[in-house]
Image (spheres, coloured by chain):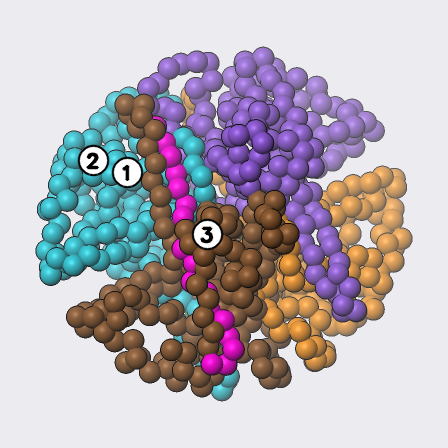
Chain colours: A purple, B cyan, C brown, D orange, E red, F green
DNA sequence: TTTT
DNA sequence: TTTT
């Protein structure tokens, strides 16, 4: 509801792969995307140099579904979100950290995609409507994702389930996942 | 729900005056604020120059109330919103345009305000909850103002009421004001 | 060099017309562009509504040239800049105000443009270096376009030259235009 | 000079510690800062929850010096920069990644700091001009810090020097550090 | 590790 | 009209 601080990320880039979408027991979708932003410049010898930065994006719910449906490797998108760093344990049991962008707004760019639906903009819907409770005028999102409804820390999700893995676990969702156990 | 395009403004500055808050018949608040952002630099003669830009901000509903309660002349704030240009008619009946920032997120800065409440961050609540309809978890705003619920153009508000004026009329709210006539 | 405040605008949209590029006596280019950002949403009756906001963009120098060369009506771009409101006088001698976005960063989107050069990103160059004049303290870039080198207020440009016009005069450049008289 | 993509981070928060400033052989300063952004909200039980996100900031050159001089634990600042993820090796020789915000603009907030200098805004200076070396095309600032002058990948710095460490090595500067060996 |  |  309130917050102290601003945590905002704005990216425009291309996807390195098709989005990976997973569904949780309660039907909520989660998508992971890999986005490249690159910059090129001339060095002091006049040679063109290029550097690409890869960003790990996480989307939830409707936004995740849209990503899965309309985005693919190479898609150019605008995203807005917030930074979130998660701690996890690798196979040796060592602490590791992964920083992700929790996306709350996405915009497909280019408009000439063959899918026919390119060019739309989408925002994270508010939380709590996941179990199908109908609420007439609830659809108008516009909200910055879970910005105001951050994670129920440890809310019913066994932390131990992620131990000993070699890739980072999925991001803690930025809203209540009730009592389901996602993975 | 969807959008095509991004329209985002981010400002940090100080208020030139106390916020002006007005209430509409349905109880919704609207606030107008004047925000200064200034930059200084050294010119080619080494003289320090300064330039101040004044921004007209508009806030609605809860955000407007918070502004009226906690902000005053001199307050330093962070705001995020979107640009909106309105057409109005001056006293000579001539078309005029005013550009405003419709704020959907505000953050009080400084933290050492005497009021004791400095330092909070607030976001525009979603629309449609103004008549006191209770909806448990509905309060968590998080949404970017009316970003997704733009104006009912001409929605019940007599345009003629603003003709012949010498200052710009209040901004068309960025969401349904039902059937009330604000001014 | 220093500033107090943040004045930032981020837009993604399409051009309503080809850019208008003009050159000043000293060879500097100035471009005016009209950019649309639109949002659509479902109203309470479930009808899809759409609203388009038009933004007046101003670019200087190299950025203006690039705009003239690569952008045209319909081009989709990302821009970053600052808000600036200028006062001018209409044909009746009345004060009028126009708010523009002084662009310091531009990114062509889409990437499949026929021109072969789509997809590049460009930033405003600093002021006053177009004639190769060496200027010791000129190096402290890091700056967003003219962000740190604001207008020489009234610098050699006859204000009266703009009186009695029906369209807004060109924006005060955000940097020295030396001693030339642009229009 | 050109880029394809946008990589932008905007943060407002408080420093968890005094900035750590180090100087390189060529006199360039590098600062590391730890910035907290926190958000609070009411959960479904009506309990106030809070979550704090910690961000690792890196500043170079003049900005780093200003940070060292004016910022301290608790300082509230606005920063703008870009995301950069670096690979390094821990003491076991394992690959690790650290994501940092390379800051190119900083603004001190609050204004009532006891130091007397609070409230200024600063931007990253462009690269390589600290020793007064003249460089024709160096003037075209408009650039966001090193945004246009990214790292000379592997530029003279022995990677091996960082092997086997347990904390992340300092960020590769986003511009030429000439031929010096920083650490 | 900050801040309210 | 603010702020430093």
Q: Residue at x 49, y 87 (%)?
A: B45
Residue B92 drawn above or below residue C24: above
In-image side of C14 versus A159 (left or right): left
Estimate the spatial distance between the alpha carbons at disc 1 and disc 2, rounded to whole Å: 8 Å
Q: Which residues are magenta?
A: C25-42
Q: Is residue D149 magenta?
A: no
Residue A20: which quarter of the image? top right
Estimate the spatial distance between the alpha carbons at disc 1 and disc 3, rounded to whole Å: 27 Å
The residue to which callout 2 is attached is B155
Q: Residue at x 16, y 59 (%)?
A: B94
Mark drawn on residue C73: 3
- Residue A78: x percent and y percent? 55, 42
Residue A139 drawn above or below residue C86: above
* Labels 1 and 2 touching (C-beta < 8 A): yes
Mark drawn on residue A10: none
Q: Is residue D82 visible?
A: no
Foreground label between 1 and 3: 3
Q: Are marks 1 and 3 on the same chain?
A: no
Q: Residue at x 25, y 30 (%)?
A: B130
> For this rendering, which residue is in front, C160 or B140?
C160
């Amino acid at each position: 509801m309130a917050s102290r601080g601003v945590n905002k990320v704005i990216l425009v880039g291309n996807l390195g792969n098709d989005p990976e979408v997973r569904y949780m027991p309660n039907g909520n979708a989660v998508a992971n995307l890999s986005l490249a932003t690159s910059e090129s410049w001339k060095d002091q010898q006049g040679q063109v140099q290029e550097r690409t930065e890869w960003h790990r994006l996480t989307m939830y719910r409707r936004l995740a579904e849209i990503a899965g449906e309309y985005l693919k490797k190479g898609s150019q998108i605008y995203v807005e979100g917030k930074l979130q760093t998660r701690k996890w344990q690798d196979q040796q049991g060592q602490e590791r950290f992964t920083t992700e962008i929790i996306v709350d707004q996405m915009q497909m760019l280019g408009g000439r995609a063959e899918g026919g639906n390119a060019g739309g903009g989408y925002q994270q819907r508010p939380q709590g409507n996941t179990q199908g409770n109908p609420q007439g005028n609830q659809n108008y999102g516009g909200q910055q994702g879970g910005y105001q409804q951050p994670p129920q820390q440890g809310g019913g999700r066994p932390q131990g389930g992620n131990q000993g893995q070699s890739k980072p676990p999925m991001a803690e969702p930025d809203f209540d996942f009730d009592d389901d156990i996602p993975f």
